[in-house]
Image (tube, rainbow, N blue to C red):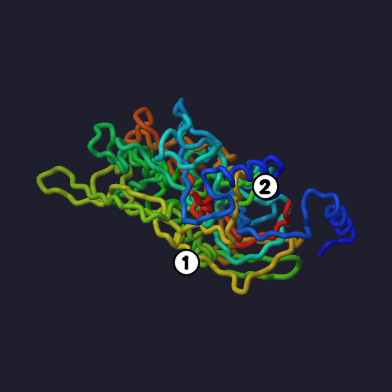
Amino acid sequence: MATESQQITQMIASRYGTANYGNLQVLKWQYYDYVRMTPSTGIVSQKLNFFSIPQGSVDPNSGVAKTLEETNLDRNGQLTYDYVITGIRTHLYVLPKSRQNTVGTVSSSTTFTVGGVSNAGGTGTGSLGYAGGTMNFLEQLSGRGNLVVNFGQKRYFEVNQPFKKCPIGAGVTIKSYGGGTPTTAGVNTNYWYSQSADKRDAYMVTPPLFVERDSIIDASISFVDTDYSSTNYTLPNLNSVSGSFAFVNVGLCFDGFAIVPTQ
Amino acid sequence: MAETNSQQIVGKLQSRYGTYARGQLQSQRKQFWSYIPYLNSSNVAQNTYTFFGSALGDQQTPNLQRTNIPVQGSFGTSAFLLKSIQCSYYIPSNATFGVDYASATTTYATDATSGLWPDLVSGWAQAGILQFSVGAKNFVTIPKPFLYAPPADGRSDLTVTRLTTSATPTYSVGAPEAELHRLSEEQYLVDPELYIDFQENFRVQITYPAGVIPQIGTTSLPATQGNLYIGVILDGVEFRPVQ
């Protein structure tokens, strides 16, 4: 709800402004926010906050300023436009190779993305897919967590296991996955994790939720079960160097319609 | 959109002497596409790719494989109702889609650097922002556009099997193969649709503001012999004057 000063500003805007708030237009739109899953310790944050840090501000976990690739939030905790939410997606994904961790030369490893471990055990350098590796870790993590979204003081969404219940519903189709760096003869096993890439699996918000642009968003994914510990929630290393874990981002995306003023 | 006096005068001349019937329109389903090289002439990836920035016949887009847009950044004498956006790519005909096991330099250990697999699962397809603007106003923003707005064109499959050479051949399914989504129901629908008027200027860009994503596949995706082309397809209904 607009304050008195906001109402005055809107009146001035309607008369002299560059946007016409009396003439609105509906656009398909999505608000999205990606945060780094872990700080430099590699331990998954117990609470990941979304839509709290706008473009240009630094993500505390990654230590890097957010760009339009991470979020299209312009204001801290507030949407730019009046918005109708019709769907919710989460995205749990390993960053592209060139944006990966430089510790342990992960970002330049020629075997990044492949698995490659024999029955005898041991990790292939730079591999994500060995048993007990990054891909297995993400699969286990996707069975945990609670998504909570508040607008103002009121709770509107509670979703258990959001990475499964609210999948991204997009991605590449992987027909086969193999290769690797087998260091010993024998059977080599690789794992690959991905959320459902089927759009039909997306979490639909029915009835849709209308959110005013000045509403304060408080959205988070928390891992609150008793098993949360640094041991259980540390990303595995990709090679023998300490801290050589893969960078993983977690995204929260609201699908819907933005109500924008005409210009 | 209001016409200027000169446009009205031209319109009158056209209605009397012109080659098409001004004011009478026909509509048809239409796809406009624009493909540009992922690597520049120095074989380096960019952080901004502008689509529909050159018209059919221009130096950058000399043939119909690259684009069918009649005018740079505009639908020319047609208007367009945008219903869907698709992001796609193609590779040179002499490149190998998956791992090239026949290549002496490609071994079982290098599927993360050869072929298109690593680029799709850990490269340019996993990042980026698509923005569609008309005039100065942004109407569409899609994060990770190759995932959220896939080709959805029923593209073909390439399935691989591999046998090791030995006295007892061993069957392996270890050849990696990935593709962008092909199902039509995965299309990114522009709903409600966007209407772009005659002669109106628009801009489509895919950018990587968080950093350039170099092409990973090098062994069997020969940048020196061809290039990886990324593209944007605008699908909808064209309105054009009756001739």
* A76 over B106 or under it: above or below: below
Q: Nearer the viewer, residue B157 or B173?
A: B157
Secondary structure of the residue carrying tag 2 is: strand
A244 or B53: nearer the viewer: B53
The image shows residue B163, relative to residue B211, as above or below, that is below
Q: Position of residue A143 (x, y in %)?
A: 49, 65
Horizontal side of residue B198 vs A78, given as left or right: left
| Label 2 in the same subunit as label 1 | no
In this view, the residue in front, A130 or A213, is A213
B55 vs B216, left or right, is right
Residue on which the image places disc 2: B137
Q: Amino acid at mark 1?
A: Arg
Residue, disc 1: A200
The amino acid type found where label 2 is placed reads: Lys
Q: Say which element carries label 1.
A: helix
Q: Residue at x 68, y 50 (%)?
A: B1
Is residue B124 among what the camera can see?
no
